[in-house]
Image: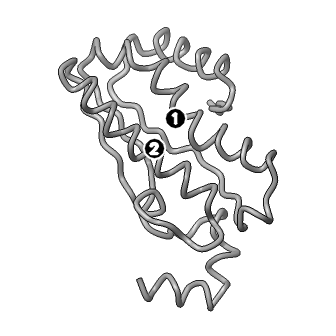
Amino acid sequence: RATDVADPSDVEALFKEVATRFGRLDVLVNNAGIVKSGKVTELGIEDWKELMSVDLDGVFYCTRTAMPALIASKGNIINVSSVSGLGGDWGMSFYNAAKGAITNFTRSLAMDHGADGVRVNAVCPSLTRSELTEDMLGDKALMAKFMER
């Protein structure tokens, strides 16, 4: 079912439903995300809040809510970060900040919960063709910069 990961009560309802329906949780994949392109001087506070609420807070809410079940099952968490979380991109400072935080959150979770039997990893894909990236993929100058690095 669809879940608003930026809403802690919706996340809690989802995991209650999972527990009722399946009785256990083995894997959490944190993959929800949005993009706000533009320089920090071009985007507003509401843009920042919206992106962080989905891309970063959503990872926290899902992880925190799922962790007891994952400890019980000795489960796994896979966080979808980005190469943008390992370095910067042009006109993507909000997204870069969120993905960098996810990358470091993943490291901390692995250190904190490895002893509980929970494996935590991140995948960091590069630019991927999707609805979120259509505008960027059409920008030849931007694509040339991506190819140079």
Residue 90: name its quadrant: bottom right
Query: Would you name the residue on which mark 1 appears?
Result: 59
Residue located at (51% from left, 27% from top): 62
Front in this rendered view, residue 133 or 109: 109
20 left or right, relative to 42: left
For the point 72% across and 62% down, which residue is it? 40
Quarter in which the N terminus is drawn: top right
Q: Which picture quadrant has residue 124?
A: bottom left
Specify the amino acid type for callout 1: Val
Instruction: Place residue 77 in its image quadrant.
Output: top left
Q: Position of residue 6 (x, y in %)?
A: 67, 32
- Label 1, secondary structure: give it: helix
The residue lying toward the viewer, choosing from 136 and 93, is 93
User: What sort of colour scheme is used for the picture?
Assistant: one colour
**CB of mark 2 within 8 Å of CB of mark 1?**
yes
Pointer 1 local density, CA inside 10 Å: few below 14, some 14–19, many at least 20: many
Q: Nearer the viewer, residue 56 or 18?
A: 56
SS type, badge 2: helix
Report the side of 89 relative to 76 (left or right): right
Residue 96 position, x and y percent, is 54, 58
Q: Earlier in the sequence, mark 2 or mark 1?
A: 1
Left or right placement of residue 82 versus residue 73 in this view: right
Q: Which quarter shows the C terminus?
A: bottom left
- For mark 2, what is the residue? 102
Q: Considering only vertical position in the picture, is 32 above or below 140?
A: above
Quick one: label 2, few (<14), some, or many (20+) residues within 10 Å? many
